[in-house]
Image (tube, grey):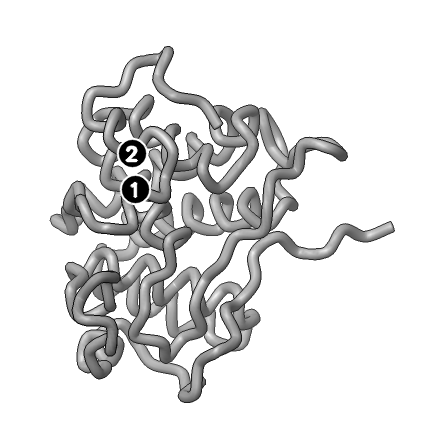
Amino acid sequence: MKRPPRIVSILAIANESQMIASDLAAAPAAPDGGALLNVRQLMYGEQLILWAARHWLAGSGGWPRVREEFALACGCARASRALDGLERLLHALNGSGSGDGGAAAAGDRGRTVWLHRLASHRVSGDELALLRALACYQAGEPHAGRIFLEWLLPPRTAAGDAGKAAATLAAALRESGHLLPRRRTALAAAVPGADAAATASPDAVRH
């Protein structure tokens, strides 16, 4: 029996038109007084990741646009590595990973991962955790990155193919000059071990 996907869209979005990463930056500010991040506050590399992940969730029709944007942002060779890492990471998040530490076995599948739809100006807690994880991998702190991945995935999966995929994506973006900031926001408090991640060790907080 086929498992349902673990990544789902947050539905309460009025405008669902497709937008490229630069369009996301022009979206209206969040009406929450700035308590939560919105896409206008993100660096281009962060916008690119979320835009691509949301396109992936929406279906394959927009993926050629994603490939083109990554090629412009990273150059062809690095774009290919970045997209390979991103797709493997998203497959792992969706419960369909493979290889070392891939899809979790029954009873160890983790939870639903929430992404906003393409046109949303909001950044969900899960989207923020993904960005924080990649920023840690970019900074050469994989144990800290794994803490954030374990907020999204079972530990075995986070330590396996998902972690390798995140490292590949983070490195390709770093080599292209797209550095991801180590953000500290109100949402970080929702991620177990978020405060410890800055000085994480192999024995850091587990889910």
Q: Is residue 141 above or below residue 133?
A: above
- Decide which of 40, 98 is in the foreground and name it: 40
Residue 62 x/y as whole percent: 47, 75
Q: Quadrant of residue 15?
A: bottom left
Q: Nearer the viewer, residue 104 or 167?
A: 104
Q: Check disc 1: other Cα within 10 Å, few if <14, some if 14-19, many if 20+.
A: few
| Residue at x 19%, y 27% (from the top left corner) | 198
Circle 1 SS class: helix
Q: Which residue is mark 2?
A: 194
> Measured along the vertical axis of the image, is residue 53 above or below residue 111?
below
As helix, strand or loop, the secondary structure at mark 2 comes to loop
Q: Which amino acid, by three-letter code, is at mark 2?
A: Ala
Rendered residue at 21%/57% (across/down): 45
Q: Quadrant of residue 85?
A: top left
Q: Amino acid at mark 1?
A: Ala
The circle drawn on residue 169 is: none
Q: Residue at x 18, y 61 (%)?
A: 42
In the rendered view, tell whether residue 161 sits above or below residue 86.
above
Q: Are marks 1 and 2 in contact (CB under 8 Å)?
A: yes
Q: Please name the residue shown 18% across and 46% down the image.
A: 183
Q: Is residue 33 left or right of residue 190?
A: left
Q: Which residue is mark 1?
A: 189
Q: Nearer the viewer, mark 1 or mark 2?
A: 1
Q: Position of residue 205 (x, y in %)?
A: 38, 21
Mark before the other along the chain sequence, 1 or 2: 1
Where residue 167 appears, x then y in whole percent? Answer: 34, 34
Left or right: where does residue 119 sit relative to residue 97?
A: left
Above or below, comparing residue 181 to residue 61 in the picture: above
As measured in the structure, the alpha-carbon distance from the residue carrying label 1 to the one carrying label 2 is 7 Å
